[in-house]
Image (tube, rainbow, N blue to C red):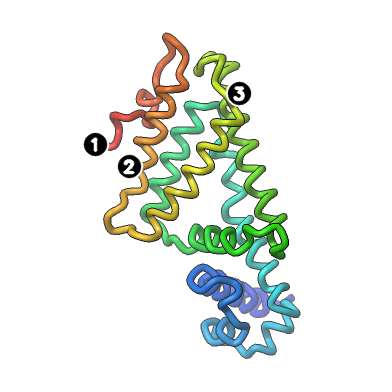
Amino acid sequence: MQRRGVERRGEIVHAAMDLFARQGYRGTSLAAVAAVAGAPTSLITHHFGTKQGLLQAVLEEMDLQSLAKLDDLVSPGWHAAATRMVQHAEQMSSAAPELLALQITLTVENLSGDAPLHSYFLRRNRLLRELLAKSVREGIEAGELRPDAHPEATAVEVAAFLEGAAVQWLLDPETVDLAAMYRRYFGTLTAQLVADGSSCGSDRGAGPGTDG
């Protein structure tokens, strides 16, 4: 594919990401994507075939932007993972929210077991929980956390927080401080999980005293 063709393809994908985030996949037509991208509908079908093909390209781009960071965010042990997630929230607060809005919108549209992308988002969610549980297990093994901390239950709780915090911030970014919410949550959770005598997450920037 020539350079201009690659550029036009990327413009169409990003136009679709914006519209899917704001209107949902079901509420977005190929004609609407074409209008935003400044391209004829025939060019979209040339590159992607169908609306489903365009959605697949959007998912691939979404994974490229988000999942590539996920293992780095939550893999190095509990204290480091909590600190990195707070730092990630600080970065998100100053960045465009379209990618996060897209993820939330498409997830909600595919909650039903017979939805076309249900399996995709189920696998994505399980991967997140597995990585979070891994961080808790590493924290237990390193003596950072209590030996009776429950990795799987903690992972479900943290995953639920991440989704809920995202919705609150996307709905009202003017009054919801996403980074402060992360600092309070991970500081409180770390204090609950920390082993006797080990340092609390606040020493590493994820504790309850770090949100000013």
**Residue 85: % across, % down:** 47, 39
Residue under label 2, please give it: 180
Where is the N terminus found, in terms of image quarters?
A: bottom right
126 shown above or below 197: below
Q: Distance between the residues labelled 1 and 2?
A: 8 Å
Q: Is residue 169 above or below residue 188?
A: below
CB under 8 Å between discs 3 and 2? no
Q: Which residue is drawn at 63% across and 56% down?
A: 64
Point out which mark residue 74 bears.
none
Instruction: Find numbered disc 1 in the image and state the secondary structure of the residue it sits on.
Output: loop
Q: Do the residues labelled 1 and 2 touch (CB within 8 Å)?
A: yes
40 relative to 200 in the view: left or right: right
The quadrant holding residue 109 is bottom right
Residue at the disc numbered 3: 137
Nearer the N terminus, badge 1 or badge 3?
3
Q: What residue type is labelled 2?
A: Ala
Residue placed at 44% from the left, 10% from the top?
196
The quadrant in which residue 149 appears is top right
**Is label 2 in a helix, a strand or a loop?**
helix
The amino acid sitting under disc 3 is Arg
Instruction: Work out whether mark 3 precedes mark 2 in sequence or the reverse, and give the earlier one.
Output: 3
User: In the drawing, does residue 147 fall left or right of residue 200?
Assistant: right
| The label number, if any, that marks residue 212 in the structure image | 1
Furthest-top residue in view? 197
How many residues crowd around disc 2 within 10 Å: few (fewer than 14), some, or many (20 or more)? some
- Tell me the amino acid under the disc marked 1: Gly
Q: Are marks 1 and 3 in contact (CB under 8 Å)?
A: no
Which x, y percent locates residue 83? Answer: 44, 33
Q: Position of residue 134 (x, y in %)?
A: 62, 30
Q: How far apart are marks 1 and 3 (CA)?
A: 30 Å
